[in-house]
Image: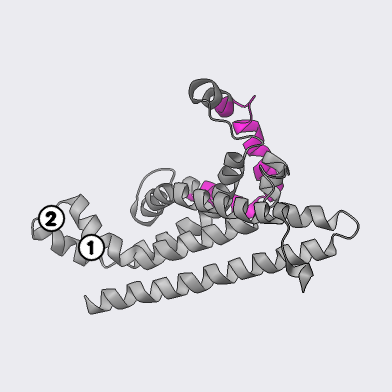
Amino acid sequence: MEWLALSPDEWNAVRLSLKVSAWATLVSLPFGLLVAHLLARGRFPGRSLLNGIVHLPLILPPVVTGYLLLLGFGRRGPIGHVLEQAFGIVFSFRWTGAALACGIMGFPLMVRAIRLSVEAVDRRLEAAAGTLGAGPAWVYLTVTLPLILPGVIAGMILSFAKAMGEFGATITFVSNIPGETQTLPSAIYTFTQVPGGDFGAMRLTLVSIVVAMAALVASEVLSRRVSRRMDLA
């Protein structure tokens, strides 16, 4: 069973994947909440266009998404150049770029889960809270947010799981640099390209399966606990 033991480089790939996925999910969450509410309740010109743009990463080949990120956020890209000159932020060929790519690829899944929860909220409950003197912000924090919390959790878990498995956009945008941008999928791909790399690829594949299953189980457990607390309340 010694072949199951991960090497230091493999552990680095696992840790980097967890780091990238966590940052991608957390940074995407505020934007996911905003966009989900706009799509669920907004009535404005361009709503269909916004919906199409949000879900575009699900339709486009991941390599295309990565190439577009490279054009826009690379050091010579219009956004990347400004960020580097003004704030010293660099995305291309850095782990931060991997987090950006993973966040964009998982964003549609997060938005969809939250949007469905927002659409399921009985707006009469919010109106009732408003008639009792609660302001819009307080109504959102005490009524809306608790009601959509299962969807928020599900969206975060789905986004995290998607980030853990993202390959095409990441390797196109930030390459496959060990210790810097080599995530689990990139490390598995590297093992498949070298002689005798089957055991390494299998080890990391098993790790990916375990992490994905743990994320799905955690999502189910957390959603059930939140639902039970809401029912008791």
> How many numbered discs sit on the rendered protein?
2
Query: On the picture, is 144 further left or further right than 70?
Result: left
Residue where numbered disc 1 is placed: 143
Q: Residue furthest front?
A: 2
Q: Is residue 35 above or below residue 197?
A: above
Query: Which is the main secondary structure of the residues drawn in magenta?
Result: helix
Q: Is residue 133 left or right of residue 15?
A: left
The reply to whether the C-beta atoms of the residues labelled 1 and 2 are less than 8 Å apart is yes
Is residue 116 in view from this perspective?
Answer: no
Q: Which residue is mark 2?
A: 134
Q: Is residue 206 magenta?
A: no
Q: Residue at x 74, y 69 (%)?
A: 4
Type of amino acid at the residue the image marks with label 2:
Ala
Amino acid type, mark 1: Val
For the N terminus, the quadrant is bottom right
Magenta stretch in the rendered image: 51-80
- Residues 44 and 174: in front is 174
